[in-house]
Amino acid sequence: MKSEIIAIYPGSFDPLTNGHLDIIHRGARLFDRIVVAVLVNLEKAPLFTVPERVEILRDAFRERTNVEVDTFDGLLVDYARRRHASVIVRGLRAVSDFEFEMQMALMNRRLNGDVETVFMMPAEPYTYVSSRLVKEVVALGGSVHGLVPDSVEARLREKKLARETLRA
Ligand code: PNS
């Protein structure tokens, strides 16, 4: 019997963008199961907590039975081994992403040659969208409508209001 192909889609997802959503939907069509794995990185100062990011992702994919949301820390390839995953999915938006992504893919291959990195391109309208820019635009009062899920847009607005209230 053919075993199922499990893919891991790792990232910070701070916050989830429509570009991430697009890649996850593509991955869910290509692989038997895709595990969206939120990195627990204690060094960064995130806008959304890990539980908030997990909640947003679970909410976005509650109707897709082959999309799972999880968290991980430590080496990605160790996590992939624990989850019996043979694929790491990464989105590639532009040439500028390529250098770092290639370094990560080759390092991961060196660490575990059984896991293959697969790059996927998001739909054209999302090729310039990043979590970092989304946060910057919102912090400076701009609109990110259409670039992130509605639930994320609402939460970004709440965070901004909360910060402004604290400062006032
Ligand atoms: O969304 P991001 O921040 O671009 O995701 C980066 C991520 C989570 C894929 C990367 O930082 C990662 O894999 N971290 C886990 C630690 C690890 O395995 N490091 C060696 C990879 S070369």
Image (spheres, rainbow, N blue to C red):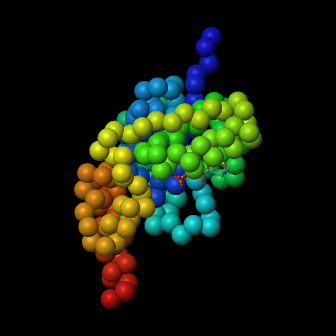
Quadrant housing residue 42: bottom right
Q: Position of residue 127 (x, y in %)?
A: 36, 46
Q: Is residue 26 above or below residue 19?
A: above
The residue at the point 46 percent across, 42 percent down is 92
The residue at the point 52 percent across, 58 percent down is 50
Say which of 133 and 74 sits in front.
133
Quadrant housing residue 26: top left
Name the outermost residue toward the top.
Answer: 1
Name the outermost residue toward the bottom.
Answer: 168
Q: Position of residue 89 (x, y in %)?
A: 53, 37
Q: Give left or right: position of 19 versus 11.
A: left
Q: How many marks?
A: 0
Q: Is residue 54 above or below residue 24?
A: below
Q: Position of residue 95 (x, y in %)?
A: 46, 46
Asked whether residue 70 appears in the rendered view, the answer is: no
Q: Is residue 96 above or below residue 159?
A: above
Q: Give left or right: position of 138 versus 34.
A: left
Q: Position of residue 163 (x, y in %)?
A: 37, 78
Quadrant housing residue 134: bottom left
The residue at the point 47 percent across, 53 percent down is 13
Q: Quadrant of the N terminus?
A: top right
Asked whether residue 161 appears in the rendered view, the answer is: yes
Q: Quadrant of the C terminus?
A: bottom left
Q: Give left or right: position of 118 versus 16.
A: right
Q: Is residue 101 above or below residue 50?
A: above
